[in-house]
């Protein structure tokens, strides 16, 4: 009886010690890897999310930019991290969908090597042109490109991004020919666009919108099916090219085998953050719509978009340069 009593007491004591440790998450800074350069749309949006979540959770959430390799460099750093909730990353349409069609070898398996926690946002792209290019509308761009085949160069913030594939889809649906020039960062691409080295770009509104509103570039179309309340005077590309639509999305991911209680806590914190008026206003200012999801919904989004973009890659003939 004494042995049983002592054994029961030890088990209860061990459980009592374990509960504070579980309840303590997080008790140190969290690293959030953004697999693209500072200054782009993913960086700006994730910094806004990290700031709000940090206030809620009581620990710093530090952005760590790891650009390159069509998002594979940063994503692989996440894959190799401990599944303890202290290393997270931004996963989007590139790393979770288009890479599977565009890359000859993707060094990670989305469903085996990653934990998808929640989608966080959706946003559209603005088609912007250099102010000296003699086109002010999408129909004028198509006519100019057909009259000057191969003379227009379009920039993107990397192979496989919606800035790249969106224009490839546009080319395929309109029959125009333009040269693709990939950059490591959208900011560098827009700098060259303003200088005239590049004539065209179709990139996320958080990056392109402020430049267009300031008159540094000209916005001639938006990639959503409906006009944006933020840019009501910019026609949709679909008004000229029926059925054309490109939407970017992205959320928070973690290494495989992240404990379910931590997944649930992070998902709840993301939902709370995205419901806050301050963050919603910040997202709106950046041209993005908050779009939280359950982990399963996020996984299903990845699967659907993988199939969709595989068809577009095949249809357009897009390749990694």
Image (spheres, rainbow, N blue to C red):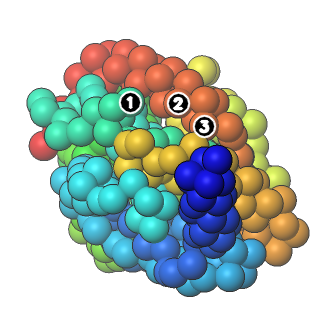
Front-lying residue, 247 or 269:
269
Give the secondary structure at mark 1.
helix
Residue 295 disc label: 3
Total of numbered circles in the picture? 3
Can the viewer see residue 284?
A: no
| Occupied quadrant, residue 190 | bottom left
Image quarter in which the C terminus is found: top left
Foreground of the two, 200 or 308: 308
Distance of label 1 from label 3 (alpha carbons):
12 Å
Q: Is residue 317 visible?
A: yes
* Above or below: residue 11 compared with residue 115: below
The first of marks 1 and 2 along the sequence is 1
Residue placed most toward the observer, 167 or 293: 293
> In percent of the image, x 24 and y 39: which residue is there?
108
Residue 112 picture location, percent across and down: 33, 32
- Alpha carbon separation for disc pair 1 and 2: 8 Å
Which residue shows up at 87% across the image and 69% down it? 277
Q: Are marks 1 and 2 in contact (CB under 8 Å)?
A: yes
Residue 21 image position (x, y, % from top left): 58, 69
Residue at figure coordinates x 48%, y 61% from the top left: 85
- Residue on which disc 2 sits: 299
Query: Is the residue under label 2 in contact with that under label 3 (CB below 8 Å)?
Result: yes
- Disc 2 on helix, strand or loop? helix
Q: Above or below — where is 276 with respect to 240?
A: below
Residue 111, numbered label? 1
Task: Give the x, y percent position of residue 92.
Answer: 46, 46
């Amino acid at each position: 009886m004494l042995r049983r009593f002592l054994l029961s007491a030890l088990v209860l004591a061990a459980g009592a010690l374990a509960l504070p440790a579980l309840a303590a998450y997080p008790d140190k800074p969290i690293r959030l890897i953004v697999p693209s350069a500072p200054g782009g749309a993913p960086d700006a949006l994730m910094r806004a999310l990290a700031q709000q979540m940090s206030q809620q959770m009581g620990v710093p959430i530090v952005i760590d930019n790891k650009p390159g390799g069509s998002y594979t460099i940063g994503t692989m750093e996440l894959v190799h991290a401990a599944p303890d909730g202290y290393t997270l990353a931004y996963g989007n349409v590139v790393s979770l969908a288009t890479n599977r069609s565009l890359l000859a070898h993707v060094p990670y398996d989305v469903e085996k090597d990653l934990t998808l926690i929640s989608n966080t946002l959706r946003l559209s792209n603005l088609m912007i042109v250099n102010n000296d290019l003699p086109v002010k509308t999408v129909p004028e761009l198509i006519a100019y490109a057909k009259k000057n085949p191969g003379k227009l160069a379009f920039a993107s913030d990397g192979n496989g991004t919606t800035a790249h594939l969106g224009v490839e889809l546009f080319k395929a649906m309109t029959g125009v020919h333009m040269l693709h020039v990939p950059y490591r960062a959208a900011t560098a691409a827009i700098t060259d666009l303003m200088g005239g080295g590049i004539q065209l770009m179709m990139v996320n509104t958080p990056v392109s919108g402020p430049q267009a509103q300031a008159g540094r570039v000209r916005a001639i179309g938006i990639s959503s099916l409906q006009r944006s309340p933020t840019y009501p005077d910019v026609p949709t590309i679909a008004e000229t090219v029926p059925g054309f639509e490109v939407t970017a999305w992205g959320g928070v991911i973690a290494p495989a085998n992240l404990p379910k209680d931590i997944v649930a806590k992070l998902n709840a914190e993301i939902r709370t953050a995205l419901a806050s008026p301050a963050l919603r206003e910040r997202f709106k200012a950046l041209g993005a719509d908050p779009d939280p999801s359950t982990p399963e919904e996020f996984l299903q989004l990845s699967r659907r978009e993988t199939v969709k973009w595989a068809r577009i890659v095949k249809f357009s003939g897009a390749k990694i340069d």
